[in-house]
Amino acid sequence: MIMRFVVAYGAAAIVFLGLDALWLSQVALGMYRRELGGLLLEQPNLAVAGLFYVLFVAGIVLLVVFPALNGGGWTAAL
């Protein structure tokens, strides 16, 4: 059970962080600066961002990946 969680967490983290890095660096950066400019920090708070990613990926695994694995397909996670 623990190993299954670790593998699922690692895979979900790689996919999510890759897609989020692509989104933040290529797509959304200009939009965020234009629309939210005054609300953005000069430098991101990496500790808070790291905590968010750890918890968010855990939520993806627990609420989406595990139900899909246990139910035998992706429709079980819906």
Image (cartoon, rainbow, N blue to C red):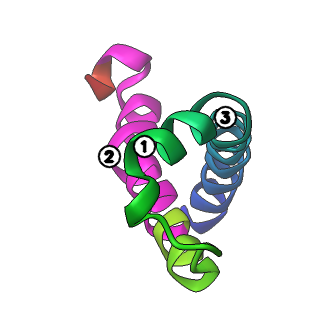
Instruction: Tell me which amino acid carries mark 3.
Output: Leu
Residue 60 vs 57, above or below: the answer is above
Q: Using the numbered discs, state the Cα–Cα distance from disc 1 to disc 3 in whole angstroms.
A: 21 Å
Q: Which is more toward the observer, 13 or 5?
A: 13
Q: Which is more toward the observer, 41 or 56?
A: 41
Labelled disc at residue 19: 3
Q: Is residue 43 magenta?
A: no
Q: Position of residue 36 (x, y in %)?
A: 39, 50
Quickly name the residue at label 2.
63
Q: Using the numbered discs, state the Cα–Cα distance from disc 1 to disc 2 in whole angstroms.
A: 7 Å
Magenta stretch: helix, strand or loop mostly = helix
Point out the frontmost of discs 1 and 2: 2
Residues rendered magenta in the picture:
54-75
Q: Position of residue 5 (x, y in %)?
A: 57, 58
Which residue is pictured at 31% across the width and 28% down the height? Answer: 77
Report the number of numbered marks.
3
Q: Are marks 1 and 2 in contact (CB under 8 Å)?
A: yes
Instruction: Tell me which amino acid carries mark 2.
Output: Leu
Position of the N terminus by quadrant: bottom right
Q: Using the numbered discs, state the Cα–Cα distance from disc 3 to disc 2 in whole angstroms.
A: 19 Å
Quickly name the residue at label 1.
66
Point out the frontmost of discs 1 and 3: 3
Q: Are marks 3 and 2 in contact (CB under 8 Å)?
A: no
Sequence-wise, the earlier of marks 3 and 2 is 3
